[in-house]
Image (cartoon, rainbow, N blue to C red):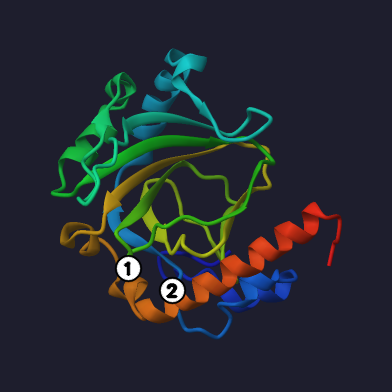
Amino acid sequence: MPDIETDPTISSEAFAASRALRPWQAVTVGSGLVLHAASTLRTEPAPLQAEFAVLDASVGPDGRNFLASDGSWCAIALVERSRPTSGTLPLPGAATPALAYMPTVGALLSRAAWTVLSCYVLRQPPHGTLVWHYDPQALHLQECRLLVPIQAPDAAVTLIGHEAAAYPAGTGWTGDFSFPHQVENATDAQRVVLAIDVLCEPEVRRLLPPALADAASLRRELAREACRCLLQWRAREHLGDPG
């Protein structure tokens, strides 16, 4: 795998050649869009890993949200999203008792002049897959999701469009998650990620390459097309048509 510090696009052409692209992935081929990139946000992974171990041992089932039907993929809320208020921007989220177990995260969230809507620790089991889905989160939209890997197995990747993204522990990054994306962990180790949902304010934009928000109209157009392709595939799969 390329060194993401010098090649953050993780070889779209090599990746495309290595496996067949789904129709919704092929939409971004040749578009020139930057689909993901590292931020300037950095933190030492060792404290995060140690604090997560304490959190994981301390929070019982009532403190977890299970995001997969088999109960394997789960999230622990550190900051919960506030109720939406009609006609206004989303409000900052509220810290949960679990945040006290991760003071490094608390310091990270409080050191920047940004609006944190929610923050979760996401855990993906060995050989787990979070299947294709899409979210209204990207740097050209109202909010985006910053991801900080806590435990990052080498072969764990996030597929966005025709590209694959993989960043090391402690390196914050984001992607254009308005496009269909899938998270794969084809390893024997669990993958643990800090997910911070924030408003796309100037403080956040300064952390990330401007190219992530370029060509907003084209992004919206291609994301609509890619999501349409995914929904059509889902409908065919539901009807038993593999085509």
Query: x%, y% of residue 72?
Result: 63, 30
Q: Name the residue under label 2.
A: 220
Dividing the image into 4 quarters, which one contains the N terminus?
bottom right
Category of crowding for the residue at label 2, using alpha-carbon neighbours closer than 10 angstroms: few (below 14), some (14–19), many (at least 20):
some
Side of 233 where 212 appears, left or right: left
Q: Name the residue under label 1.
A: 140
Choose between 72 and 41: the one closer to the eye: 72
Residue 163 seen from this side: no
Residue, x 28% and y 73% (percent of image)? 210
Report the amino acid beneath label 1: His
Q: Is residue 234 above or below residue 151?
A: below
Residue, x 36% and y 76% (percent of image)? 216
Element assignment for label 1: loop
Element assignment for label 2: helix
Residue 97: name its quadrant: top left
Q: How far apart are marks 1 and 2 (CA)?
A: 9 Å
Query: x%, y% of residue 204?
Result: 23, 58
Query: x%, y% of residue 215?
Result: 36, 81
Sequence-first tag of 1 and 2? 1
Contact check, label 1 and label 2, Cβ < 8 Å: yes
Report the amino acid beneath label 2: Arg
